[in-house]
Image (spheres, helix red, strand yellow):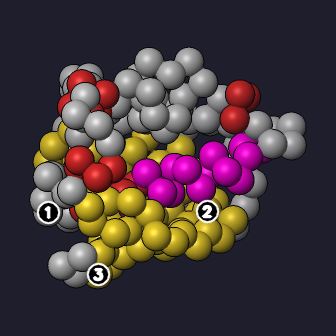
């Protein structure tokens, strides 16, 4: 599927932060179907039981995917998570390339709901979630230095992603 746009990363986020030594450093792409996709891998620092990623880190990725998908329709919207429901289908390995996908299900004036999943490269769903977000003005979420923290663009040559 064709990539329409690459989204920015941040500096310190545990999922997209490019300067966080313990972070996943995941890139996020807006796709032609209106979804957001990431190709990423967890590391052993994200371990729960040996060989498995901690459920909190899995939930973080699902939250990030759904939190970012609203930017496909309006990149100025910031939102905070109201609730999230996660289903862990299979163990999520670290040191293995994975794919995450997020979509908007319902977009209201004050809140939106989305779905996300994490799959292995064979297309097996490892985890999935649904979350609702409350839209808020940026100044109510963070301080004035937000743009320096959130607008880190790391260019790459990804123009198409083969979805499993």
Please state the horizontal and vertical placement of residue 51, each as a whole percent of the image.
81, 38
Disc 2: which residue: 127
Mark 3 or mark 2: which comes first in sequence? 3
- Whether residue 5 sits left or right of residue 132 in the image: it is left
Q: Earlier in the sequence, mark 1 or mark 2?
A: 1
Q: Main secondary structure of the magenta part?
A: helix
Residue beneath the point at 14% across and 52% down: 76
Mark 1 crowdedness (10 Å alpha carbons): few <14, some 14-19, many ≥20:
few
Callout 3: 10 Å neighbours few (<14), some, many (20+)? few
Residue at the spot x=72%, y=44% of the render?
A: 53
**In the displayed structure, does residue 104 sit left or right of residue 3?**
right
| Distance between the alpha carbons at the discs numbered 3 and 2 | 21 Å
Which segment is the magenta one? 52-64
Marks 1 and 2 in Cβ contact (< 8 Å) = no
Inspect the magenta stretch and tell me whether residue 62 lies in it: yes
Q: Quadrant of the C terminus?
A: bottom left
**In this rendering, is residue 134 above or below 16?**
below
**Secondary structure at numbered mark 3:** strand
User: In the image shown, does 69 or 156 lie closer to the viewer?
Assistant: 69
User: Which mark identifies residue 73?
Assistant: 1
User: Badge 2, how many Cα within 10 Å: few under 14, some, many 20+?
Assistant: many
Q: Measuring from the top left, give residue 67's x and y in whole percent.
A: 36, 57
Cα separation between marks 1 and 2: 25 Å
Name the N-terminal-most of marks 3 and 1: 1
Please report the residue visible at 37 percent of the width from the left and 68 percent of the height from the top. Answer: 133
Residue picked out by circle 3: 106
161 in the magenta segment: no
Residue 146 in percent (x, y) is at 26, 34
């Amino acid at each position: 599927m064709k990539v329409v746009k690459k989204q920015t990363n941040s500096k310190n986020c545990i999922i997209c932060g490019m300067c966080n030594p313990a972070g996943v450093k995941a890139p996020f792409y807006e796709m032609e179907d209106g979804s957001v996709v990431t190709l990423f891998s967890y590391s052993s620092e994200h371990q729960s039981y040996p060989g498995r990623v901690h459920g909190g880190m899995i939930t973080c990725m699902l939250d990030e995917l759904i939190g970012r998908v609203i930017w496909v329709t309006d990149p100025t919207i910031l939102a905070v998570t109201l609730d999230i429901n996660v289903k862990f289908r299979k163990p999520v390995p670290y040191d293995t390339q994975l794919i995450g996908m997020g979509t908007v299900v319902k977009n209201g004036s004050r809140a939106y709901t989305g779905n996300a999943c994490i799959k292995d490269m064979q297309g097996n769903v490892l985890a999935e979630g649904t979350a609702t977000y409350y839209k808020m003005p940026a100044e109510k979420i963070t301080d004035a230095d937000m743009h320096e923290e959130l607008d880190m663009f790391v260019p790459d040559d990804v123009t198409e992603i083969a979805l499993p």
